[in-house]
Image (cartoon, rainbow, N blue to C red):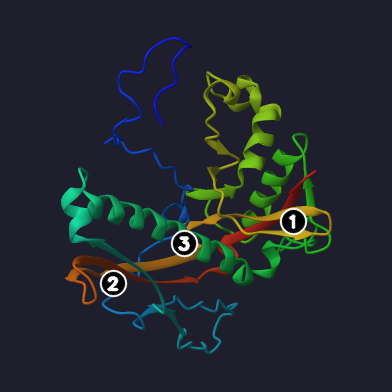
């Protein structure tokens, strides 16, 4: 179709308009992944194939006994069970580009596709892990009666989630810190993963006043949440969400990296000729596994935007 002209203006090009393909690709945005920030890879070891396992040795608890002068001592033989991290999950990608398509293209298709596959793998793995670990969180770190010592912290349960507002969200973060404190979790290297709507509530809360955060510029000016009550904050769109009654509820995680271990490896990346057409196939395989090895080092908040 020719470009429209004003009435009475001749169209010298007729109806032929050549197609021009831009070499500038449209920018693609990806969901932010947080797994590497909230887990440890201390036991990753050497992973070669799906189905491998990593054995983790745990530290036994030594019994302390009262002593009276002259009594016979009781000797303990410390023992502890091994924890097995199974590398039992795998995700793959496989793409094909025809010889003619590759020859005529003015961009590197294979490189573009492999970069996108890498980002998509991270999103899939993050979603898988974040949706599964809540089942292994210690019972004293979640629910309506959380707190190993106090049992009076409400972190929400199915049917009665916590309703978060800009007025109470900071209190809920402090509650998460309390339940971790009651389980003697180190104060350093703590994290908190929240959905974007909770990030918006924080920016509307009292934290918008720079004097309350100790920063020179308020979060309303720079958008950085930074640290709150010893937690480094991360925002993610990949946290598990469900519809509970009339509310859309999200499970948020707070904890220490010692609580969750993760191991992964790209074990295959290969290019081969296609059998049924003229073209190249590029494919890759990622194997991974994860395990909550210290359930008391993770807490979860089940909440919705009230």
Residue 140 vertical placement versus 166 (above, below): below
Q: Which mark is residue 45?
A: 2
Upstream in sequence: badge 3 or badge 2? 2
Label 3: which secondary element:
helix
Label 2: which secondary element:
loop
Q: Nearer the viewer, residue 115 or 228?
A: 115
Query: In this figure, which residue is indicated by the disc labeled 3?
Result: 124
Label 1: which secondary element:
loop
Q: CA distance from mark 3 to mark 2?
A: 22 Å
Query: In this figure, which residue is indicated by the disc labeled 1?
Result: 155
- Mark 1: few/some/many CA within 10 Å (<14, 14-19, 20+): many
Query: Residue at 21% of width from left, 77% of height from top?
Result: 275
Q: Is residue 180 left or right of residue 122?
A: right
Residue 260 vertical placement versus 32 (above, below): below
Q: Is residue 80 left or right of residue 144?
A: left
Q: Nearer the viewer, residue 169 or 48?
A: 48
Query: Residue at 75% of width from left, 49% of height from top?
Result: 304
């Amino acid at each position: 179709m020719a470009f429209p002209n004003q009435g009475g203006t001749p169209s010298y090009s007729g109806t032929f308009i050549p197609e021009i393909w831009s070499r500038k690709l449209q920018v693609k945005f990806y969901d932010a992944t947080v797994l590497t920030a909230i887990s440890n890879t201390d036991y990753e070891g050497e992973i070669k194939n799906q189905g491998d396992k990593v054995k983790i040795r745990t530290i036994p608890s030594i019994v302390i006994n009262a002593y009276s002068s002259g009594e016979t001592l009781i000797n303990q033989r410390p023992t502890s069970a091994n924890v097995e991290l199974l590398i039992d999950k795998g995700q793959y990608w496989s793409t094909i580009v025809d010889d003619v398509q590759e020859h005529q293209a003015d961009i590197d298709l294979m490189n573009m596709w492999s970069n996108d596959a890498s980002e998509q793998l991270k999103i899939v793995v993050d979603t898988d892990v974040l949706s599964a670990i809540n089942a292994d969180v210690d019972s004293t770190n979640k629910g309506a009666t959380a707190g190993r010592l106090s049992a009076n912290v409400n972190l929400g349960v199915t049917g009665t989630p916590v309703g978060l507002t800009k007025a109470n969200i900071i209190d809920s973060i402090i509650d998460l810190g309390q339940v971790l404190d009651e389980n003697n979790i180190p104060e350093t290297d703590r994290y908190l993963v929240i959905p974007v709507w909770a990030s918006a509530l924080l920016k509307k809360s009292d934290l918008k006043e720079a004097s309350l955060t100790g920063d020179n510029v308020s979060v309303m000016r720079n958008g950085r949440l930074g640290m709150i009550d010893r937690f480094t904050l991360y925002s993610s769109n990949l946290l598990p969400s469900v519809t509970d009654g009339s509310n859309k509820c999200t499970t948020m995680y707070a904890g220490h990296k010692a609580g969750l271990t993760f191991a992964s490896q790209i074990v295959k990346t290969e290019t081969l000729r296609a059998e049924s057409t003229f073209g190249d196939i590029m494919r890759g395989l990622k194997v991974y596994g994860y395990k909550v090895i210290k359930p008391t080092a993770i807490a979860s908040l089940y909440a919705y935007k009230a």
